Image (tube, grey):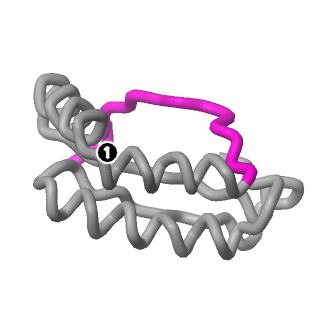
Amino acid sequence: VRVDGSPSAYLALLSKLTANSARLGTAVPRVWQATSAGTGTGAILITTASPSMAAMEESQNKMEADLEAQKLLREIEATGRKVVARLIVRDRTPR
């Protein structure tokens, strides 16, 4: 994501969203911020891990049905956050 407004306000709201996700039993997001990435310095990456596409869809449905989550998401949008990419990835780390 790119935050055109206040990254601090955005990150503070993410901690509330993480707590809400834990309450709902949905995938809890991890938050990463690039600290040494040239022009990407400061970029924020949000990741969640789900064991299956069905579990990911179930988490999404719970979040969409939860009034508190929807309120938090509206507040997050108000920080100037811009989603620049949505990815579904598979871990291919050699074991």
Residue at figure coordinates x 74%, y 51% from the top left: 80
Overall secondary structure of the magenta section: loop
| Magenta stretch in the rendered image | 80-95
Query: Is 45 drawn above or below residue 42 in the view shown?
Result: above
Q: Amino acid at mark 1?
A: Thr
Q: Quadrant of residue 94?
A: top left
Q: How many marks?
A: 1
- Whether the magenta-drawn stretch holds residue 35 is answered as no
Q: Is residue 11 left or right of residue 49?
A: right
x and y, in percent, of residue 45 in the image: 56, 53
Residue at figure coordinates x 19%, y 38% from the top left: 62
Q: Quick one: which residue is furthest to the right in this view?
A: 39
x and y, in percent, of residue 30 in the image: 39, 61
Q: Is residue 15 left or right of residue 39?
A: left
Residue at figure coordinates x 67%, y 75% from the top left: 8
x and y, in percent, of residue 41 in the image: 79, 63
Between 52 and 90, the one nearer to me in the picture: 52
Query: Is 70 drawn above or below residue 87 in the view shown?
Result: below
Residue at figure coordinates x 65%, y 71% from the top left: 9
- Whether the magenta-drawn stretch holds residue 85 is answered as yes
x and y, in percent, of residue 95 in the image: 20, 49
Q: Quadrant of residue 76?
A: bottom right
Residue at disc 1, secondary structure: loop
Query: Is 8 drawn above or below residue 81 in the view shown?
Result: below
Q: Is residue 60 left or right of residue 43?
A: left
Q: Which residue is mark 1?
A: 93
At label 1, counting other C-alpha atoms closer than 10 Å, the crowd grade (few under 14, some 14-19, many 20 or more) is: few
